[in-house]
Amino acid sequence: MIKCVIFDCDGLMFDSEKISIEVWKRIGKKYGFNFDEEFFTGITGSGKGQAKKQFDRYPGISDILPEIRAERDRSIFEKAHTTGIAKKGLTVLLDYLNKNNYLVCAGSSSPYSYVAELISTLDKPYHFDYICCGDMVTKCKPDPEIFLNCAKALNVEPENCLVLEDSKNGIIAAKNAGMISGFIYDTVSKDEQFSHLIDHEFQDLSQVIDYLKDQTNA
């Protein structure tokens, strides 16, 4: 029985990954870097340790990281505060979870301040029982620490948690945590390394409601 739903942030709750990739490509091109699909799959949803494996493939990239990160955050927050970047079905699902007394968490490799600011741009205040972010743990995704911290903080067993993810690193982390994994495509396509770890796949966040109703009625 699902008692807790854990949301990733970038690419899952918010349409920020596409903005991020555009910034990476634009600034990278300015300095002579041409990032491939493996690069973006490797850094999406990951912490510094996992991302470093991809950064090491591009010698000299460390010199432009501050510029890329600053422009990425500026671009994301600007759009979030003006037109909004909530993904399809997010507020509908949050309304359903809050109304039906599910525990709700956000589990992201991004810093807490970043995640909290994006959540604040939603059209109304939503209750999250716990938020665990990359600057609150020693290891980020694909390590399960973020997700396990959510379960521990709310005193719920991992097997009663549904993790909603759009990244390879996130899905691996969910399964490493012993949780149920739900995948929604954003920018990272399924591959042989993690497709078998996906328990459920949804077209958008609103479809999760039907899955939860089926679980309740089973």
Image (cartoon, grey):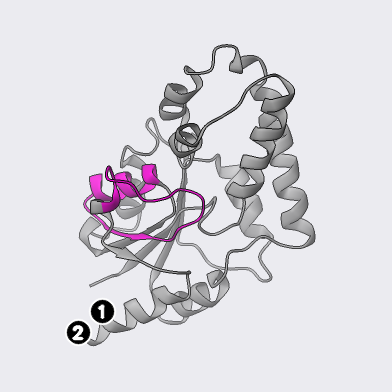
| Secondary structure found at label 2 | loop
| Left or right of residue 93, residue 123 in this image | right
- Please state which of residues 62 and 157 is positioned toward the viewer in this rendering: 62
Disc marking residue 215: 1
Q: Residue 97: horizontal and vertical position, in percent?
A: 44, 75
Q: Tell me whether circle 1 and circle 2 mark residues in contact (CB < 8 Å).
A: yes
Using the rendered image of the protein, determine whether residue 41 is visible from the camera's viewpoint: yes
Residue flagged by tag 2: what amino acid is it? Ala
- Please state which of residues 22 and 3 is positioned toward the viewer in this rendering: 22
Name which residue lies at 28% across and 83% down: 214
Using the rendered image of the protein, determine whether residue 148 is visible from the camera's viewpoint: no
Q: CA distance from mark 1 to mark 2?
A: 5 Å
Name which residue lies at 48% across and 35% down: 43
| Secondary structure found at label 1 | helix
User: Which residues fall within the magenta stretch?
Assistant: 168-195
**Magenta segment includes 191:** yes
The residue tagged 2 is 218
Question: Which quadrant of the rendered structure holds the N terminus?
Answer: bottom left
Q: Residue 84: horizontal and vertical position, in percent?
A: 71, 62
Q: Residue 193: horizontal and vertical position, in percent?
A: 27, 42
Name which residue lies at 28% across and 70% down: 2
Name which residue lies at 64% across and 54% down: 118
Residue flagged by tag 1: what amino acid is it? Gln
Q: Residue 155: horizontal and vertical position, in percent?
A: 28, 58
* Mark 2 surroundings: few (<14), some (14-19) or many (≥20) residues within 10 A: few
Q: Residue furthest bottom?
A: 217
> Does 199 sit above or below residue 218?
above
**Magenta segment includes 157:** no
> Does 131 sit above or below residue 205?
above
> Does 33 sit above or below residue 39?
above
Disc marking residue 87: none
| Left or right of residue 42, residue 125 in this image | right
